[in-house]
Structures are given as C-alpha cells and as structure tokens.
Image (cartoon, grey):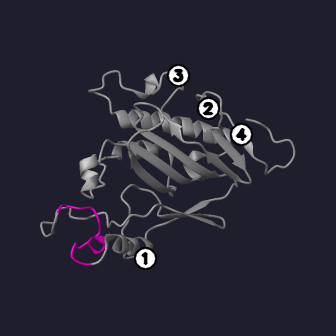
Amino acid sequence: MTVAQSDPKAPVAIFPEGVPSPKMPYSPAVKAGGWVFFAGQLATDFKTGVAPEAGAANPFLGDKLELESRYVMRNLAATVAAAGCDIGKDAIRMWQWFVSDRPTPEEFAQGNTWTGLSIEAYTNVRNEFVFEPRPASTGMGIRELAVRGASIEVDLICAADGGVSVGTTSPEGLPKPLAGYSPALRRGDWIFLAGELPTDWIGDYNNPDFSGDPSALAKEARLNPSFGTARRSRSRRTIR
C-alpha cells in the first residue's frame, strides 16, 4: 500500500499482496477521505485469461459461475483488508455484471431484454463474504467482459470510517428484492440505494391469467399496445 505523505485524507493506492495486479495503469483500489473505491474484479490472474483455479478441471462437473465468483470475492476480500476494512461489514455499495448471450438480436428487436440468467451460484458465494445488512446492489446482464471467457465482474465501495451500516427493508406495500441485498443502506450521513427495476419480483409466475408473452414486469408497469407508453408506465413505478 502506498503511504500518503501529508494529508491523511489524500488518495492512497491499494495494491494488496497475494492478489494478481492489473497490467493496465490503474489501481485495484483507492482509499480517500474515509472511503475505499474498488476497481472491477474479474476472475483473472492477468496471465492466462480466466485463472486456472477459477475454472473446473471437468467443465461438466464444476459450476463456472460459482468458481469464478469465489475467486473474485476472495480477491476482493483481500483487497478490502489491505485497505484496513472488513468486506463483511464495511461494503456499502456493490455492482455486478453477468455475461449472457441473451437477448439475441431477434429477441431484442421484439422488445425482449431478458438475459435468461440465474445468479444463485453467485449470491450463495457472495453471502459467505458479505453479511447483513448487505450492501445496496445493482446487477446487470452484458454480452461480454474484458477478459475472454469471464462470466462475472464485481466492484464495490467500502466505508473506512469505523462506523456501522444500517440496512433498510422495502417499505410496506413495495416489492422486496429476492437476491438478499439491502434496498437502501445508511452509513453515517450517507444513504446508498440499490438499483430499481419495474418489477414486483412475481410477474406472471404461477399465474395463468395474463395476456401476451409471460413477463417479470409488474402488471402496472406493462404496456397495452393500444394505449399509453411503456416508458412512462415503467418510470412511474420505478420512482414511486
């Protein structure tokens, strides 16, 4: 870790021992003013692409997402520790990118943006490192990452103030997320919000009474093709 020479709140680059260092000119993490900001972490050793220990010896027996997630979270935890924080209680905001080959161009042209992903393997591993109240989070499906063959990238912000995080559940009457993160997290005077989607986390699951293609969108966020606009309906639900 580089030591600041004067101002104790000045930015300090964090290069943890035992964690592969990026070959490009950026810091794995920067600590400044009571915060630690982390670069995106991939399951790579920066030598062979996806690190051998992040892959299964037999691809038919191991879970690719689980193995990569464990490699990523282990390296993130070590980087957080090198910054003087504890990933279990000091992580306050997380972003996750998951690779999927869906939607196909044909699906997207039809208005279908579903990635078809199941991230349970990731959340199970994440929960071994990050504890309640878990950080406010956003997860996104993307086509590919900077390392060929990688399935996931994670980055986060930690608070280095010695404080305690307070999680907030969804208010009564609003949908509760299923992935185990905090819809909002407070740390001192700061409040961090999770990403919002126009979903009630139920959609048409186990519901035989719906029109059109099955959807995970909340009913009040859907479009009747003869009336209104989808953008207005979905925006209203998200900012409600």
Name the residue carrying label 2.
Answer: 24
219 inside magenta stretch: yes
The numbered dot on residue 13 is 4
Query: Which secondary structure dominates the residues rendered in magenta?
Result: loop
Q: Label 2 vs label 4: CA separation?
A: 14 Å
The numbered dot on residue 240 is 1
Secondary structure beneath dot 3 equals loop
Q: Label 1 vs label 3: CA separation?
A: 47 Å
Mark nearer the N terminus (1 vs 2):
2
Between 89 and 207, the one nearer to me in the picture: 207
Q: Label 4 vs label 1: CA separation?
A: 39 Å
Segment tinted magenta in the rendering = 213-227
| Residue 80 x %, y % | 62, 42
| Residue 197 x %, y % | 39, 64
Q: Using a 10 Å C-alpha cutoff, classify the residue at mark 1 as few (fewer than 14 neighbours), some (14 to 19) or many (20 or more).
A: few
Name the residue carrying label 3.
Answer: 47
The N terminus appears in which quarter of the rendering?
A: top right
* Residue type beneath disc 4: Ala
Q: In the orientation shown, which residue stands out farthest toward the bottom?
A: 227
Secondary structure beneath dot 1 equals loop
